Amino acid sequence: MSLHKALTAVIIMSATIYFLRAFPFLFFKFVKPPEFVLFIGKYIPPVIITLLALYSIKDAGFFAFPYGLNEIICILITIGLQLWRKNALLSIFASTAVYMVLIQNNILEKIFL
Amino acid sequence: MHQGRIKSAFKSTLPVLFGYVPLGMGFGILLTGAGYPWYLATIMAIIMYAGAAQYMAVKFFTQSLPFYEIALVTLFVNLRHMVYGLSLLDDLKEKNIFNSYIIFGLTDETYAILQNEKKENYFLISLFNQIYWITGCTLGAILGQFLPFSSEGIEFALTSLFVVLAVDMYKSAKSKLPFRIALFCGILAYFISKENMLILSIAISAVILLLTKGRLENESA
């Protein structure tokens, strides 16, 4: 695809994405949001955040060594640190650092295989 | 603008910085590798501002997909964003340029962070996150493969960010049911279709939330 066509595609995609993000605001400006919509809006944030966490490790490869253990270990570190020290940055940086060390050096492989 | 607010927005978004820069760089490398100029990466980060969709766009370009197909696939991949606004209808109901920008910048990560923030911080948080993204995309496109160290795995900061936000919400939630619903639906959707797992699990969760309405409202009262 030429650069010119690619730019057109970018504009089409951008408009689509902005439309989706703005849709609820546009739509419910004219229509009073029904009760079930407000109910979902109120209770869905924790659901979505949990789902985003799960989704972000979907490619971990749970059916072959290391069975997603790198991800599971580091998520447990995050949860543990967050409950213990209640410091979000600490929980995130410590677990990410451990994760990087684990996968860059294939640590689990060296221990178990 | 108040300096304390800038500081607080920076602190809240720091994990996103560590996720967006490497992810953005990955995109920039991919795009220039496909033969496009570096500034296209910057343009896309500014006007499109979407992670998965930008990565997919490179595939669309190289395969020269027809425009209607590009629009359809984009629509489907980003369908979840339609749900995000539902929780912010009230906060962003006033029509002004700040709110329009916040709506434009409602990525997964920004949406997640806003849930634990006060309304007056929304704009700066959205802006900071996009600046990180633009920086990452542009750097990747210009620098390409010349990285001095291996940053492999640094994107785990985003997983960790979602986990931290979930833990904080879990502790303050009166009803733990939404978390159990999410775990169940997430795993179920993973086995049904890994690639469409997000939109699938959000849809199933919304239905179950409605079915358990009575219990949820009781426990939260």
Image: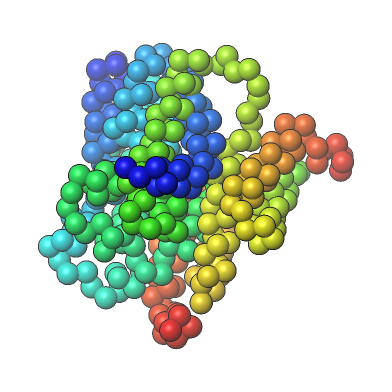
Q: Identify which residue, B181 or B115, lies in the foreground.
A: B115
Left or right of B121 on screen, residue B216 = right
Report the residue at 33% width, 57% height from top.
B119
Q: Identify which residue, B13 or B193, lies in the foreground.
A: B13
Q: Let me know if residue B214 appears in the view.
A: yes
Q: Position of residue B148 (x, y in %)?
A: 63, 17
Query: In terms of image quadrants, where is residue A97?
Result: top right
Left or right of A106 on screen, residue B179 = left
Q: Single out the residue that lies furthest toward the left.
A: A30
Q: Single out the residue that lies furthest toward the front.
A: B3
Report the residue at 38% width, 23% height from top.
B41
Left or right of B174 on screen, residue A15 = left
Q: Position of residue B206 (x, y in %)?
A: 40, 67
Left or right of B56 on screen, residue A91 = right
Q: Position of residue B138 (x, y in %)?
A: 42, 22
Image quadrant holding the N terminus of chain B, namely top left
With respect to residue B162, does B136 lie above or below? above
With respect to residue B99, does B144 lie above or below? above
The structure's colour scheme is rainbow
Q: Let me know if residue B108 appears in the view.
A: no
Report the residue at 38% width, 75% height from top.
B210
Image quadrant holding the C terminus of chain B, namely bottom left
Report the residue at 55% width, 67% height from top.
B170
Query: In terms of image quadrants, where is residue A42?
Result: bottom left
Q: Position of residue A31 (x, y in %)?
A: 15, 66
